[in-house]
Amino acid sequence: MIPALKSDSSVDPVVITGLGLVTAAGSGAAAFWRAFQRKESHLGRLRQIDAAGLSVGRGGEVPDELLEPVWLDMPGRDAGDGGDRALRLAALAAREALDDAGLLAPRREVRIGLALGTALGAVQTLERLAAGRAPESAWRAVSPDQLSSAVAERFGLAGPRWTFSVTCVSGLYALEQAAVDLERGRAGAMLVGGLDTLSRFMQSGFCALKALSPSGQLRPFDLEHDGILLGEGAAFILLETASRARERGARSYGAVLENRLISDAAHLTSPDGSGKGMAEAIRQALAGAGISPGEIGCITPTATGSPIYDRMQSRAALEALGARGAQVPATTWEPAVGHLLAGTGIAGAVHAALVLDRGAILPSFGVESKDPECRLRYVLDGEEPFRGRSVLALTVGFGGQNGATLIGLPPPASGPARAPEKAPSPPQAAIAAAAAAGRYIPSGDGAAKAAELFSPARPEFSTDPESLAALFPGRWNPRRELPPGLGPLVQTVASALQAAGWWEPGQPDPVPGGLALGTDWQGLAAALPYARDLARSGPAGASPSGFLFSLPSSAAAVLGILFGLRDYQATITGGALSGFQALSHAIDRLAGGKASRLVAGALTIATPELRPFLEAGGVAAPGEEAGTLELAAAACLEPGGGDGACRAALVEGRDRPLDPAGGAVEDAPELERLPAGFRRLAAPALFSLFSALEHGKMPCLWSPRDPAQGARPRGLSIQVTGTFLKKTSSIN
Amino acid sequence: MPLTDELRAQIKEMLVRRLRLKVDPAAIADDQPLFGDGLGLDSIDVLEVVAGLEKEFGAAIKTQEEGERILRSVNAIAAYLVEKGSPRKA
């Protein structure tokens, strides 16, 4: 792993200039702080959702009156026009953050982008559709990217637009991209948010996973801690570069000093109890920010109230911070409002900003007798003053997702007080080395070189459970089927990794590197049957794996486990452009020195059950016979390439994914038999780009704003299986 | 509810269906361990079976740990259901 490059003291830090937070405690960061200060728990019996049959019927709901559609000027009913609770929640918190930053009124001089994280998006609309209680037009709203589009439209946000879905760390992945967009000047400000609503869907899934507190009490770090209580909420922050904030006289709450994400990649639900992955994330964050453990003034673990997470974060902090780990005051706000799912990471940033702003650390509550295995210095009695430079916020998510975020006092105008760690191998050096070794692709004879590099390796293995267990020793249960539709993705990624020389079948060692996966609606293929079953039979006996595979991040989680790709696991659910966005996101990370190896890919699934959704989105024409289609594309990327003579450009924001000169999308003969609507989707579109590379039409990938910082694909493959339109063709 | 072969057969059928096992239900021995080298179930399987017991036998198991204790073998599950007097639902 190459350490961060934001180290250079000339780099303009990214600061927080607006806060928005809507929780069970009410609307506004001040209401949240007040509830925490008064030790008010806003967790109680669920009212807004039907709790019948749920084994745990308690949580933290946002008061309905705050989400009145009329008040939000979003008078819709069910579809993407304001009706879904997730959208109203997002709109309310987004408005707060924009207003707080003084950017609510449209200002032409500031181009604002949006990066959003959500685990399940407009899930209440999906529930109503599954129960036959919503019009067909509502299908459009259930794709998570529609949530971002609606918020952007509501507030006139014209900058880049991203939607990430990585369980409870979703918001922190959005934060990663937002910081890059600001650094590269793609936006003058970025609105970054995380949110999820409570729903029968979510609550029943957590009940099925036995993750919720049977006693109905959220007691983090207590000997009696027995599980999570969920709260709904949306947390937003407005980010700008420090220089721009100064220019317009905006108040800065603090700087995002670092944000590191690592996955344990060991299990579909459980974290690695040793806390190794989280400890690594903390160490990397400190190194990247160039601050010492002594400068951390407060730690905020994600206090789910679940023993394994409470203890794991304590171990991780002690391991990464040494003796200082046991001295830093630690607190948690979750007993006041519950575990905010994808809202957690950004809510942690909002809380950190408030700690810095008010100079105070509030005591956590709900602890009567501390679990001896939770060994941090939890603040439990009275308020303590904040001393130090930075708050370390820890965020955990299903499947061992770890986030370590440092929010600190804004550095003085001249730059950080102390120069952070220098990268030993910055991208420029890597590019030079690659060129010297003759490994980069020159623009002249791209075709020959590309043919050499991109010979598509056809999958030579089956993806039945026994074969997977043999291919991935010790990583896959020989009895567990892959989630629906993931076979082609696993084979495609395997082929790409093999072609790149990063992985061999049967290899016991994990593949160093991470993932950026784009998917239009992969989770929906599992979520819809789960929602239908829930509507029909109620929550008792709901399938825990059915719920898990409903999460859009489940595909990346499976790849992470199989190949041991754990450095980073982004899932982008940006609709049809999500494949390009995943590739762009990966290139940004490589170019920024935050990763040394990434797999970028895309997955598109269509089943007959998804038909109404596809028709509402204009992907499939009504009346066409429906079959099943599973498409995947993947490429292995590492820093390199970058040649000013490249003919095609890649990805800036969402509106111009390809340079028309590249002409790639229609140039892939393998896709000709796909229905026209499908050629534009995540996997086919990304494949057509790869195909153009393979055929030498596009010798390399580069970012048009910064041709020196490219990323070079080393191996890639594509697989098309199944048929969607049996009437017109079969695709094999 | 008596501890009968019929109850054991119902449990085996539920296991095979719910976990999509590629075995004949009758081939699962009454005492065969369900975890480790036996049927090789993992922690998500445990939850899946707990959900199956709840839905089909009306047996509410509160925590994953409790599930792991009860789900040692078909016989152990059957004994638990008999003790709880859980009727088969459907």
Image: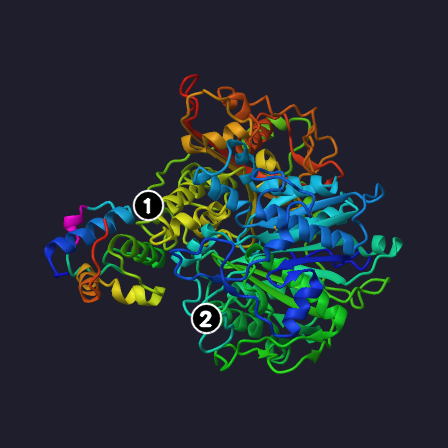
Residue A275 pos. (x, y %): 51, 67
Whether residue A639 can be seen here? no
Residues in magenta, as a range: B24-28
Q: Is residue A599 left or right of residue B1?
A: right
The residue at the point 69 percent across, 80 percent down is A384
Q: Chain of mark 2?
A: A
Mark 2 Cα-neighbour bin, 10 Å: few <14, some 14–19, many ≥20: many
What amino acid type is highlighted by mark number 1? Pro
List the residue tagged with mark 2.
A307
Q: Secondary structure at mark 1?
A: helix
List the residue tagged with mark 1.
A465
In depth, the one of A19 and A301 nearer the eye is: A19
Q: Residue A77, located in which quarter of the rendered image?
A: top right
Q: Quadrant of the N terminus of chain A?
A: bottom right
Residue A700 position (above or below residue A295): above
Q: Is residue A190 left or right of residue A711?
A: right
What scheme was used to colour the molecule?
A: rainbow
What amino acid type is highlighted by mark number 2? Pro
**Callout 2 and callout 1 share a chain:** yes
